[in-house]
Amino acid sequence: MSELKVKITPTIKKKYNIQSNTIDFAELEEKIRLAIARDRLDRLARIAKEAGLFKND
């Protein structure tokens, strides 16, 4: 197995909910996918609200 060193800011670390200084690539990939999915869902919800298709009771 190879090792790759990547530097990230504390903001990015928090955004992707990375707790430690080492992480398996598959886990990092999953965290990024989840963050992208959350961003897309938030955007869709905002668009639906603006179009009157979604009500948050």
Image: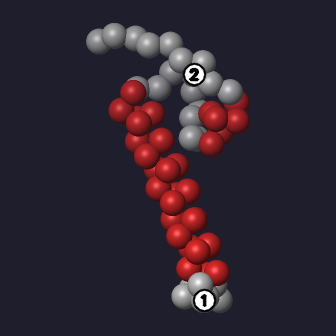
In 3D space, how far apart are the residues under numbered discs 2 and 1 (Cα atoms)? Answer: 44 Å
In the image, taking residue 30 as reference, residue 51 lies left or right, namely right
Q: Who's the residue at 64% across and 81% down the image?
A: 50
| Crowd tier of the residue under label 1, counting other residues whose Cα lies within 10 Å: few below 14, some 14–19, many 20 or above | few
Say what amino acid the circle numbered 2 marks: Asn
Number of labels in the image equals 2
Label 2 belongs to which residue? 21
Q: Quadrant of the N terminus?
A: top left
N-terminal of the pair, mark 2 or mark 1, is 2
32 in relation to 9, above or below: below
Query: Percent from the top left, x then y, of residue 51?
Result: 59, 84
In the rendered image, the residue lying farthest to the front is 51
In the image, taking residue 6 as reference, residue 27 lies left or right, namely left
SS type, badge 2: loop
Query: Percent from the top left, x then y, of residue 2?
Result: 34, 10
In the rendered image, the residue lying farthest to the top is 2
41 in relation to 22, above or below: below
Label 1 belongs to which residue? 52
48 in relation to 12, above or below: below
Q: Which mark is residue 32?
A: none
28 in relation to 35, above or below: above
Q: Quadrant of the C terminus?
A: bottom right
Question: Residue 6's quadrant in the figure?
Answer: top right
Query: Percent from the top left, x then y, of residue 36?
Result: 49, 50
Query: Percent from the top left, x then y, of residue 27?
Result: 41, 35
Q: Who's the residue at 51% across and 65% down the image?
A: 41
